[in-house]
Amino acid sequence: MRRVRFLPVAVLALALLGALASSAAAKTVWLCKPGRAGDACDVSLNTTLLSPTGKKLGVRHIKRPRKPKFDCFYVYPTVSDQKTAAANFDIDPELRSIALYQAARYTSDCRVYAPVYRQNTLASLLGQVQATPEQRAYAYADVRSAWRDYLRNYNNGRGVALIGHSQGTFVLRRLIAKEIDSKPRVRRRLISALLLGGNVLVKKGRDVGGDFKHVPACRARSQTGCVVAFSTYGETPPSNAIFGRTGEPGKEVLCTNPAALGGGSAKITPIQPREPFAPGTTIAGAIGLVGVPQPDVSTAWGESPNAYRARCSSAGGTSALVISPLRGAPVFHFSPDATWGLHLVDANIALGDQLALVRHQAAVWRRAH
């Protein structure tokens, strides 16, 4: 009898906790949001042009448009140094740094919306703490809530480009499949999705049929509603590479070269902020091991036009963007080991090409809509 009397109280308590959690998740914490005070993406865009060896060639003074014509929705990779398995909503220094490195430069063309989410932390990734199934579910739930918030309150029918890297790409793969690919009205708003370092799947020899039924790989600059995806290596990836391989029968990992969507090799343009990544953090140390130099410039950014050559390769069964330095450009080193390749440079190694591509795709999208 006691158990019968107690059960409704327990159910009510659990329901209340669930409602409170749902309510908390519904209020988006924005890392980047237009007009927000202290916005992590509100930085100078002025850029020094550099030769591959770092010689200054000139300065580009870039003004942020007063009324950008389209939006960008960005989900950052695994960067949190919090010691729990799942991060909270605090905007720690590493979050501000990753927004600077990977998202801020897009404000030259679009309004950037980037939600803070309870990601699985580096401590979890490194096995220092174990995430529960509930904690592993936080990341997608938070980003989905933020996406719906964005659509409901800020989109107003505008075209939107999605940008993600690593854990951010894994989250966006699911978001696109569930919230965009299957919904024609929402799918029509998609300019493109830059899904880097996250093993986007397609059917072998096809541009769709893996993660998405309707959203294909981008194969031409004027194509919209499509996906650009790659993981970077400085040499042929090892047979146990983490990125570019899948065990799913009949599937393969997508690689699209942002500078040569139709295939083949092309020169690419890295863009790097002058400001070092948040000192003392795990990612800052890892970037140091890769050997990425900080631009010795007075502007906020350094850009090295055509400093590397890139091509999508499937050698050894791994689908990856293999890069090689040109004219004395720095040679990067894998980190933390060869299986990861140059994962930490995915977002910046061809940032100049990605910016130009999204700008062009947005113009095409606007003409069509």
Image (cartoon, rainbow, N blue to C red):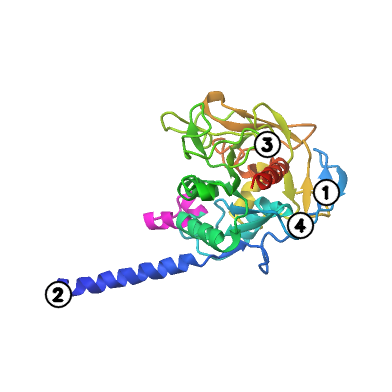
**Residue position marked by numbered label 1 in the rendering:** 48
**Residue position marked by numbered label 4 in the rendering:** 65
Reading the chain from its start, which is encountered first: label 1 or label 3?
1
Q: Amino acid at mark 3?
A: Arg
Q: Quadrant of residue 276?
A: bottom right
Disc 1/disc 2 C-alpha distance (Å): 74 Å
Label ID, residue 2: 2
Disc 1/disc 3 C-alpha distance (Å): 26 Å
Q: Nearer the viewer, residue 259 or 337?
A: 259
**Residue position marked by numbered label 3 in the rendering:** 221
Q: Kindly tell me whether residue 280 is visible in this rendering.
A: no
Above or below: residue 326 compared with residue 185: above
Q: Residue at x 73, y 48 (%)?
A: 272
Disc 4/disc 3 C-alpha distance (Å): 23 Å
Above or below: residue 44 compared with residue 265: below
| x, y percent for residue 139 | 47, 55
Q: Nearer the viewer, residue 296 or 28?
A: 28
Q: Amino acid at mark 1?
A: Thr
Disc 4/disc 1 C-alpha distance (Å): 19 Å
Is residue 247 shown in magenta? Answer: no
